[in-house]
Each structure stands twice: as structure tokens, then as C-alpha cells.
Amino acid sequence: MASKVNKDSMPCNSPRPANDGKHKRVVKACADGQEKIVRYGAKGYSSNYSPEARKQYRKRHAKEANSSKLTAGWWAFHDLWSKGSTVYREGKSSGKGERFAKKGKAIKKAMA
């Protein structure tokens, strides 16, 4: 089990690598007098791996750009998918539907 995040010792709005094994980043989000620990970015999936992927992601998630800083979507949009971000580009990088491939094809492809 991952260690708990101590909200009191974290600075506001400064993302850092997550240690829970599920997420890429964690941040103590502070907005409008509120504080919240926000974890975002699924491990195992790449972020911002090509200009085309960034364009498509930002188009799909444009509403999150203006949402509250207390949401994971806001942080993913502005941290993981911003131009010039180098956070976690490894993982599934083709963006051509590995998650949706038929299991038989995916298994054969993996064994080849």
C-alpha cells in the first residue's frame, strides 16, 4: 500500500510524482480558500506523445481547461497535456487503439 500524502507538508498547486502505483502525479490543489489532494494521469498510458495526440486530447477535453483547479481533469489538461510537457511520455504511445484491439489479435501481436 502506498504511503499517505501529508497535505499539510505539500505546497499549493505544485504537482509531484505520485507514489500510489495507479497515478502519475499528485498535487495539493488550492482554489477559492479550499484545499484538496488531487491524483491524476493513469500509469501505463502515455501523455502528450505527439502533436496530433495533444491536439485531439485538448479538443476532446476543452471544457476541463476552464473547470475548477480542484479537479483531476484540470490538472491533466494543464500539466500532462500542455505544450512542452515532458511528464511521462512513455507507455502506450501509438494512440491507435491498443485498448480496443480484439483480444485474439492483441495476444498474437504480443507473441510475435
Image (spheres, rainbow, N blue to C red):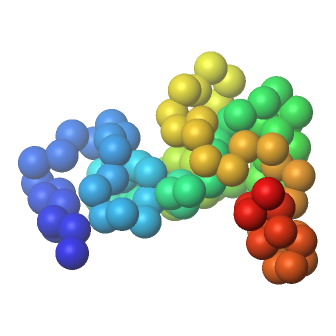
Please report the residue visible at 86 percent of the width from the left and 79 percent of the height from the top. 104
Nearer to the camera, 106 or 94: 106
Please report the residue visible at 18 percent of the width from the left and 61 percent of the height from the top. 5
- Residue 101: in sight, yes or no? yes
Which quadrant of the rendered structure holds the N terminus? bottom left
Please report the residue visible at 64 percent of the width from the left and 42 percent of the height from the top. 47
**Is residue 67 toward the left or the right of residue 109 in the image?**
left
Q: Is residue 28 above or below residue 36?
A: above
The image quadrant that residue 44 belongs to is bottom right
Q: Is residue 80 above or below residue 73?
A: above
Q: Is residue 62 above or below residue 20?
A: above
Nearer to the camera, 92 or 55: 92
The image quadrant that residue 93 belongs to is top right
The image quadrant that residue 45 belongs to is bottom right
- Residue 32: in sight, yes or no? no
Residue 8 placement (x, y as % from top left): 11, 54
Please report the residue visible at 44 percent of the width from the left and 51 percent of the height from the top. 24
Q: In the displayed image of the protein, which residue is found farthest to the front?
A: 112
Q: In the displayed image of the protein, which residue is found farthest to the top?
A: 84
**Is residue 102 toward the left or the right of residue 23 in the image?**
right
How many numbered tags mark residues here?
0
Which quadrant of the rendered structure holds the C terminus? bottom right
Nearer to the camera, 68 or 22: 22
Residue 19 placement (x, y as % from top left): 28, 56
Nearer to the camera, 64 or 60: 60
**Is residue 70 toward the left or the right of residue 4 in the image?**
right
Residue 78 placement (x, y as % from top left): 59, 38
